[in-house]
Every structure is written in structure tokens, then in C-alpha cells.
Image (cartoon, grey):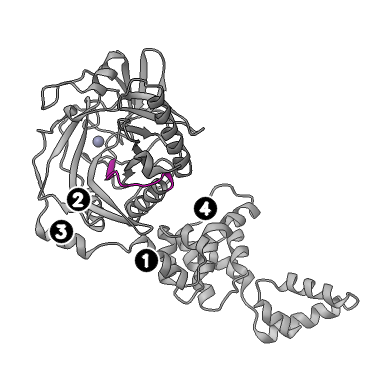
Amino acid sequence: MDYPKLGFKCGLEVHGQLDVGKLFCECEGRLRKDKPHFTVNRKLRAMAGESGYIDAAAAHAQAKGLRYVYEGYNDTTCLVELDEEPPHTVNKEALDAALTIATILHCDIADYVQVMRKTIVDGTNVSGFQRTSMIATNGYIEVGGDKISIIFVGLEEDAARRTAEDKETVTYRLDRLGIPLVEIATGPDIKTPEQAKAVALAIGMLIRATGKAMRGIGTIRQDVNVSIKNHPRIELKGFQDLKSMPETIKREVKRQQEVLYKKEKLESHVRNAKPDFTSKYLRPMPGSARMYPETDLTLIPISRDKRADIEKRLPELPDVKFNRLLKAGLNDVLASQVLFDDQFAYLHKKFKKLDPKLIATTLLSTQKEARKKADQDEGNFQQEHFEEIFKLLQDGKISKEAVLDMLVEVAKGETVASAAKKFKLMSDVELKKEIAKLKKKFAKVPENKLKGIVIGNLRGKADIQKIMKFL
Ligand SMILES: [Zn+2]
């Protein structure tokens, strides 16, 4: 498809959860599966925003007349999530992460941050609004040689998550409400559906590079704004994964072409992306009428010193880090797998003499294999276990082949020290003696088979090349 000729316009809003507690209280930002301690019921009404108008999306939600049930926990949700108490001061770590991202994206950072209330009455919050703030504007990111403008970087509260619904009631859990989200909005500069995916990936990596991003599925979410000439803007949200993004955008372009061809009514709205690449009408496009200032919080000044401090502490950028790992000896696949792995970073730094490939595969696959061999589903390996094993390896006390066997023993409940006794490397004299013994025992076995027997017996107790040499 000739996207420039179609007047293809596309921009992204990427939201990343931060793993630093809640944004406006001191609760943990942890999603829970256990039974909630209490529930409260609410109904929400749409309020007119600063401009005096009620937002179209808010009116749409209120018209459904639903009752909302909120599930909370005594120890990880508080009165702030319930909107029974004003917000506390902004989470400093979250603000620093947003400022870091804004700095990397070459943005102009605000002198003062004004927290706003965004009217949303679909039940995803208790108060009828979401707190959101603009941290920086007017930046850019380079992706595959193209410069994509960044309109703004924001910091906002995540919504409550839906756990159940019926005709009259929707149940939400408060554990997610108030988790900090850094929001990055690009300009409509994206040229093709494939580029949308590449930009989303690059922005997601930047969020992770701060070291404050939450991990796992659904922690980084993308909304895509897309339109072609003569069609109003459509927002696509709810992508399951980045892979489905280009095809979903392509289908949306085709849908817009059809709407134009059939001369159907044109309306800017929000659509939900489905796993089969189609999308479904969700609600009208919210407008600017939904915003008004949060009067329970003062302006947050961002001083010149603060900016200088952030600039001094910028994290290593993902592409720089990736190249460094390649140089250290990792291949593309391993390097991308451990790119944001803190445990790998720590062990790689601590055991500089060890092959980083060995450290990476130990963490990525060997430990799983060891658990399987030991018949242990649950991981019981701790950081110390890896450190102790790598220390023995670095000091030449065990061979790299012994790492798996050692982990199997540890998975069975042994200590590293006691396992090490079994897999201690043999001295050259001991090794020669042991080989001689095996040769005698298996004197009638043909030579190529003998090789296998000897290695099988001595694997992990000496360097394989050395065994071969002595044999
Ligand atoms: Zn709280």
C-alpha cells in the first residue's frame, strides 16, 4: 500500500508501569491474586471540566448507569486509592524516571509540574478522575534513521483493574490503581505500520533502560492514533503484543478506506484491538473538556540542579549496551535476552574473568534444566548460589561442565559448599590415575566408545580437553 499517497498519519502513546510503589501514596505497587480484604460500592458521575463542558467519553460511560465494586487489601491499599484521603506528595523515584526519559528524548522539561485531574467515569478509578501530569514537551527519538517527534512525556496513575462484570455491576481491584505510568506521546510522524512497531519497541526499551520499569506482560501498553486523508483520527488500544501492531494498523487503514468509499458518518473514536487484527468500537474520542487542575497538590518545581543531576545519572542507552554485550562475546539472541536483566548485569560485572555467555546461559537455561533434573518446579536458586558457584569457577576449583551438576544438587537442597566437594576438579596426577583405572576396567571396549565412557565418568571433574589429552 502507498501510505504517503493515502495521507497516512500515525502516532503512538506508550504507557510504561514503574516499579517504585504508588504515585501518590506509600503503598506497594503489587498486583495480588489472593482474596481481597474488603469491598466498597460506588457510582460515578461525569463532571464538567475547566471549559464548562462535560466530556463526550465521560457522558458515554455515565449513560451506562453501572454500579462499581472495588476490592482492596488492608496492607497494600490505603485511603488514597479509595479517594477518602487527599493524595500525598508525588513519588520522587517515579518523577526521576520520567525526567530521565524526557532528558534522553531531548525534551524541554517543565519548570513546574501541575498535576491535573482527567475525568474518567468508566469505573477504572474510585474518584471519577485519573491524576495525570505533563513533565516535558517537544523532543524526538531516532528510529532506523528517521526522526520521530515526541509531543510530550507525562506521569500519571494507572487505573484499577477489572476482575469481574455482569449486566449492572463491574468489579475492579484497587491494587493497580495509582501505580505510576510514564506516558510518552509521539507526533503523527510514523510513516508505515511497520515503523509504528519499531518506534513502540524503541520507546519501550528506553523505559526499561531506566531500571525502574515493571516487568512482565501488560506492563508496557501502546495506543496507536491513525488516520488517512479525509478520515478523522482513530485511536486503537489494547494491543496484546507488538507483533500484532502492523497488521492491525493495516486493517484499520482498509476500514477507513471503506468508510470513506461508502460515505458513512465520520466520527473520531476509540477502538479496541482484537487478537485477530480487527478492532471494535469502544467509545467516543475523549476531548480536552475532561481536564481540570488537581487542587489537593501544589505545583512541583523542577529546579536547574535537579535537571543537572538527572543528566549526570543518565542510564546506558539500550543500543550502546547491546553493542557492549556483543563485544564482550554474547551473540545477538543472548544479548537481547539479558539486555535488561539486573542479575546478569551484576554477575557479569562481578565475574569479569568468566565468559559472559556462560553467565547468560546459566541464568537463562541452565538453571531451568537443573530444576527439571532435580524434579523441582519452584525456583529455589538465590543470587548467593550463583555467586558462590561462579566464584569457584573463576578460581579454577570446578569446571564449567560442573555448573549444571552443582545447580542440580543445590535444587535438591544441598549447599554450594557441599556440592562443590563432589565436583571439585581433579589434580593432573589424580586425573591420570583415574583415566588409567577406567582404561583397565574397560580394556575390551573399542576406542571410540571408551572415550565416551571416560568423559561420562569424569565430566565436571576436569577440563574436557585435558581429559582427551591424557586419554
Ligand atoms: Zn495507598
| Distance Cα–Cα, label 3 vs label 2 | 16 Å
Q: Position of residue 418 (x, y in %)?
A: 58, 66
- Residue corresponding to mark 1: 320
Q: Is residue 324 magenta?
A: no
**Label 2 with label 4: CB-CB less than 8 Å:** no
Mark closest to the chain's N terminus, 3 or 4: 3
Tell me if I can see residue 30 in this picture: no
**Label 1 with label 2: CB-CB less than 8 Å:** no
Mark closest to the chain's N terminus, 2 or 4: 2
Per the rendering, the mark at residue 85 is none
In this picture, is 296 found above or below 380?
A: above
In this picture, is 223 found above or below 401?
A: above
Tell me if I can see residue 317 in this picture: yes
Looking at this view, is 220 or 143 the one in front? Answer: 143
Tell which tag, 3 or 2, sits nearer the viewer: 2
| Distance Cα–Cα, label 3 vs label 1 | 23 Å
- Residue corresponding to mark 3: 307
Residue positioned most to the right: 444
- Residue corresponding to mark 2: 138
Q: Position of residue 322 (x, y in %)?
A: 42, 64
Magenta range: 180-194
Say few, some or many: other residues with alpha carbon within 10 Å of mark 4 (under 14 / 14 to 19 / 20 or more).
some
In this picture, is 448 found above or below 46?
A: below
| Distance Cα–Cα, label 2 vs label 4 | 47 Å
